[in-house]
Image (cartoon, grey):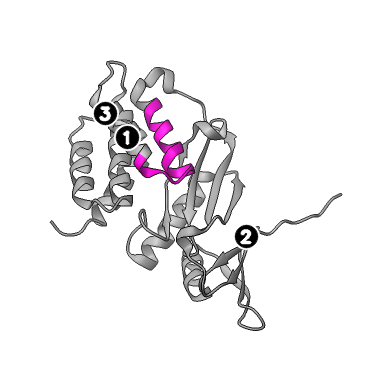
Amino acid sequence: MARETTIPLLPCRSLDDVAPFYQALGFQVTHRQARPNPYLALRRDDLNLHFFGMPEFDPATSYGSCLVVVDDLVAIHRSFAAGLRAAYGKVLVSGVPRMTRPRARHDQDGHSGFSIVDPGGNWIRFVARAATPDADDNRGGLARALRNAVVQADSRGRPEQAVRILDGALARPDAADDPGAHVEALVYRAELALVLDRPEDAREWLRRAGAVPLDEDLRDRLADTLRHAADLTAGLPPG
């Protein structure tokens, strides 16, 4: 029986930036050295990530990435979010580091996923092992636009393109649009505004999301989205 193990080795500017961030996510330091070269080994259950330090490295230009396939995507995201709240007072959704939230993606064959962009600019992409049923046909064009926007921003790092897709869909209401998809799109639009450092725009998108009438069943279905909206609101500057 094969017992091979693959461990990503990723760059960063400083181990002092990377270690506290991953410790907030529940990782433990299993090895650290300063000489002859800066090196850090981290572990969380069966997930191992190793980092090497490069003082001249620019996280904004990083191409570092790895894929992590998990059985329970929602559980690990909730655990990470709780760790970020405890360490930083909020879930980080903009800048570097940051974390997206689980969403189904067309470019991953219907599998839901979320990404962590760590202090080294590395994209750690978490993907559910099982595909998510595609309900877009029953939820209107806005739901499809949302999934396309997620591909652009969360997978490809192109939030401006995601904004163009969502703004176009939100400006052309579809009679088949599900109210839940409307709220999800508005909350994601607010998140994109924060990614682009436009907090006042984010405030307005969150206000619009909060104004969508929802019955009890929809509120239950959107519990994670509404919790995310509350996180975004809590992170806004006073105003």
Amino acid type at image mark 3: Leu
Residue flagged by tag 2: what amino acid is it?
Answer: Asp
Kindly report the distance in space between the C-alpha atoms of the residues bearing marks 3 and 1. Answer: 10 Å
User: Which mark is in front, 3 or 2?
Assistant: 3
Kindly state the secondary structure of the residue where label 1 is placed: helix
> Which residue in the protein does label 1 denote?
164
157 vs 88: above or below:
above
Question: Of 66 and 78, which appears nearest the observer?
Answer: 66
Check disc 3 and report its element: helix, strand or loop.
helix
Label 2 element class = loop
Residue 219 is at least partly visible in this image? no
> Which of the two discs, 3 and 1, labels the residue nearer the N terminus?
1
Q: Position of residue 150 (x, y in %)?
A: 42, 38
**Residue 142 in magenta?**
no
- Name the residue that disc number 3 marks: 170
Q: Which residues are magenta?
A: 144-160
Q: Looking at the rendering, which quadrant does residue 87 occupy?
A: bottom left
The nearer-to-camera label among 2 and 1 is 1
Q: Residue at x 56, y 72 (%)?
A: 54
Disc 2 residue crowd, few under 14, some 14–19, many 20+, Cα 10 Å: few
Q: Front-most of 185 and 87?
A: 185
Check residue 45 in the rendering and tell me which mark sits there, or answer none: 2
Q: Earlier in the sequence, mark 2 or mark 1?
A: 2
